[in-house]
């Protein structure tokens, strides 16, 4: 069964297709000059509008503020929360946030559209799972052909793109987006749709993945995206990036450097502090005593602490792998020039 296409106007808004929306044939905007020249961390507080989604992003943002890492680097964060990746990607593309945690695929498309989007750091690799009901006749991801898959980020999310690679290489589904009907819905709705039989499986976000694993009397995994990807290709690239846009980077290089430094300190703190996961489980109302340990296992290990040329090359390789899977018309034809900057972080 071929799934219905998202209207073109919406695709243009959320940055899912480059060629169809214009800008795909134009030369991408050049990355702003950078390096150490004029890139000193600010000595006075700087207000930064930060866009986040639920999960690993809002956790790291909460800890960054709560533990004073942002303040230590003279950052005053104005956090804007978005309920799904598409809305956040639209905000990044429209430059209504200074910095946003954006999916690698959407950031590539925005850059190709001439939006000036630039990735200057990395946050995490996937920890997502596709679930079905325990009483479902579906035994494997390959059984989803012609069925309905709910997706928290829709077709345009980096997680869906990586799932498409797994579906193709490990399960023989040539095109997940065409051979399976994709139903986009937020995490809060997906398990309800699954319970009601309105979808046959659900690809859920980070914290919802933990919720699904805890509810093992109701749901069972069809694929662990990370494990299946690693078994096929080796180490996982990052899928959630830290992005801004050229004009902001040119005018605020030092602020971006401060944000990266605060992020590094936050991730290091999170990975080594069990209390964080107990507090986070309580905050998102996961009362199962297994929740803190499972959150730490699924989320903490996926944070990526180093952003350098090697990591940027891994992201570029992922984009190249995704081009034949997603198609040039709905993705990009090549890695957009100037998409990645590795010169903002202070050299060790």
Image (spheres, rainbow, N blue to C red):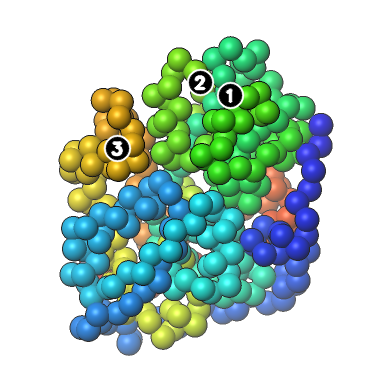
- Residue that badge 1 annotates: 195
What is the x, y in percent for residue 312? 46, 59
Toward which corner of the image does residue 11 lie, by quadrant?
A: bottom right
Q: Dot 3 lies on which element?
A: helix
Taking depth in this image into account, of 286 and 325 the one nearest to the observer is 286
- CA separation, marks 3 and 2? 20 Å
Sequence-wise first label, 2 or 1 = 1
Q: Is residue 36 visible?
A: no
- Residue that badge 3 annotates: 281
What residue is at 50 percent from the left and 70 percent from the top? Answer: 118
Q: Is residue 307 visible?
A: yes
Toward which corner of the image does residue 34 lie, by quadrant?
A: bottom left
Sequence-wise first label, 3 or 1 = 1
Q: Dot 1 lies on which element?
A: helix
Image quarter hosting the N terminus? top right
What residue is at 60 percent from the left and 27 percent from the top? Answer: 194
Q: Nearer the viewer, mark 2 or mark 1?
A: 1
What is the x, y in percent for residue 3? 78, 39
Toward which corner of the image does residue 288 lie, by quadrant?
A: top left
Few, some or many residues within 10 Å of mark 3 (<14, 14–19, 20+): many
- CA separation, marks 2 and 1? 9 Å
Q: Dot 2 lies on which element?
A: strand
Few, some or many residues within 10 Å of mark 2 (<14, 14–19, 20+): many
Taking depth in this image into account, of 271 and 56 the one nearest to the observer is 56
Whether residue 205 sits left or right of residue 321 in the image: it is left
Taking depth in this image into account, of 320 and 52 the one nearest to the observer is 52
What residue is at 27 percent from the left and 30 percent from the top? Answer: 293
Image quarter hosting the C terminus? bottom left
- Residue that badge 2 annotates: 219
- CA separation, marks 3 and 1? 23 Å
Few, some or many residues within 10 Å of mark 1 (<14, 14–19, 20+): some
């Amino acid at each position: 069964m071929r799934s219905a296409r998202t209207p073109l106007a919406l695709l243009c808004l959320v940055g899912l297709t480059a060629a169809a929306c214009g800008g795909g044939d134009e030369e991408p905007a050049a990355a702003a000059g950078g390096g150490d020249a004029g890139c000193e961390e600010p000595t006075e507080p700087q207000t930064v509008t930060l866009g986040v989604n639920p999960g690993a992003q809002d956790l790291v943002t909460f800890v960054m503020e709560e533990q004073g890492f942002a303040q230590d680097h003279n950052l005053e964060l104005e956090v804007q929360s978005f309920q799904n990746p598409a809305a956040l990607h639209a905000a990044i593309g429209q430059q209504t946030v200074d910095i946003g945690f954006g999916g690698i695929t959407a950031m590539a498309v925005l850059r190709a559209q001439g939006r000036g989007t630039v990735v200057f750091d990395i946050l995490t690799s996937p920890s997502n799972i596709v679930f079905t009901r325990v009483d479902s006749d579906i035994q494997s991801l390959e059984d989803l052909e012609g069925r309905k898959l709910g997706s928290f980020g829709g077709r345009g999310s980096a997680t869906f793109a990586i799932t498409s690679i797994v579906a193709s290489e490990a399960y023989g589904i040539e095109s997940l987006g065409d051979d399976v009907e994709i139903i986009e819905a937020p995490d809060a709705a997906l398990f309800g749709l699954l319970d009601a039989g309105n979808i046959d499986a659900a690809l859920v976000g980070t914290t919802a993945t933990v919720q699904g694993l805890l509810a093992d009397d109701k749901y069972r995994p069809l694929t662990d995206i990370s494990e299946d990807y690693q078994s096929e290709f080796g180490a996982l690239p990052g899928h959630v990036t830290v992005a801004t846009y050229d004009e902001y980077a040119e005018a605020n290089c030092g602020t971006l450097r401060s944000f990266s430094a605060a992020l590094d300190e936050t991730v290091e703190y999170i990975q080594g502090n069990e209390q964080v996961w107990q507090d986070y489980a309580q905050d998102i109302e996961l009362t199962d005593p297994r929740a803190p340990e499972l959150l730490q296992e699924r989320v903490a290990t996926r944070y990526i602490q180093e952003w350098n040329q090697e990591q940027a090359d891994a992201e570029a390789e992922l984009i190249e792998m995704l081009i034949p899977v997603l198609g040039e018309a709905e993705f990009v034809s090549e890695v957009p020039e100037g998409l990645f900057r590795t010169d903002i972080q202070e050299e060790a």
